[in-house]
Image (tube, rainbow, N blue to C red):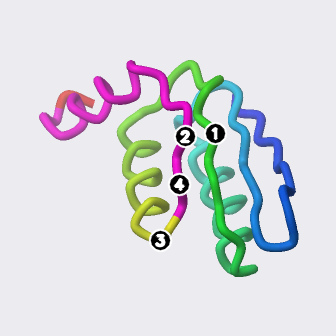
Amino acid sequence: MLKITRVVLSTQETTLRLDGRVAGQWVGLLSDSADSALIEGLKLTIDLKNISFIDCEGIALLKRLIARGADPVNAPLFVNEQIKKCKDGQG
C-alpha cells in the first residue's frame, strides 16, 4: 500500500510525501499524482523518507520524474541499493 500526501508549499511548489511501498499498482498512482503536479507547472519535490520498499518499476518511474524536474529528498539508503539491483537486472 502507498499513501501519497500532497503538501502545497506555495502556488508554485508542492511536495508529494510517500508512505509505504512504491511497487505494483501503486507505481501508477504515484505516476498520476506526480504528472498532475508537473502538468500544472509546479516545482515538485518527492519526499521518500517513509517508503518501506521500492521495486524496479518504481525506480524507473522515479528516474523519469527526476528527468522531468522532480526533486527526490530524504531517500533511505536501501533505495540506493535497490537502484543498483535494478541496474544489474536482479529486480
Q: CA distance from mark 1 to mark 2?
A: 5 Å
- Say whether marks 1 and 2 touch (CB < 8 Å): yes
- Mark pair 4, 2: CA separation: 6 Å
Q: Nearer the viewer, mark 4 or mark 3?
A: 4
**Which residue is rendered at x = 57% and y = 46% of the image?**
27
Amino acid marked by disc 4:
Asp
Q: Residue at x 69, y 80 (%)?
A: 41
Crowding near pointer 4: few (<14 within 10 Å), some, many (20+)?
A: some
Q: Which residues are magenta?
A: 70-89
* Disc 1 target residue: 47
Label 2 crowding class (10 Å Cα cut-off): few <14, some 14-19, many 20+? few
Q: Which residue is mark 2?
A: 73
- Kind of residue at badge 3: Arg
Please name the amino acid that badge 2 sits on: Val
Q: Which residue is mark 4?
A: 71
Look at mark 3 in the image and give the residue it sits on: 68
Which residue is depicted at the point 84% across and 49% down? 7
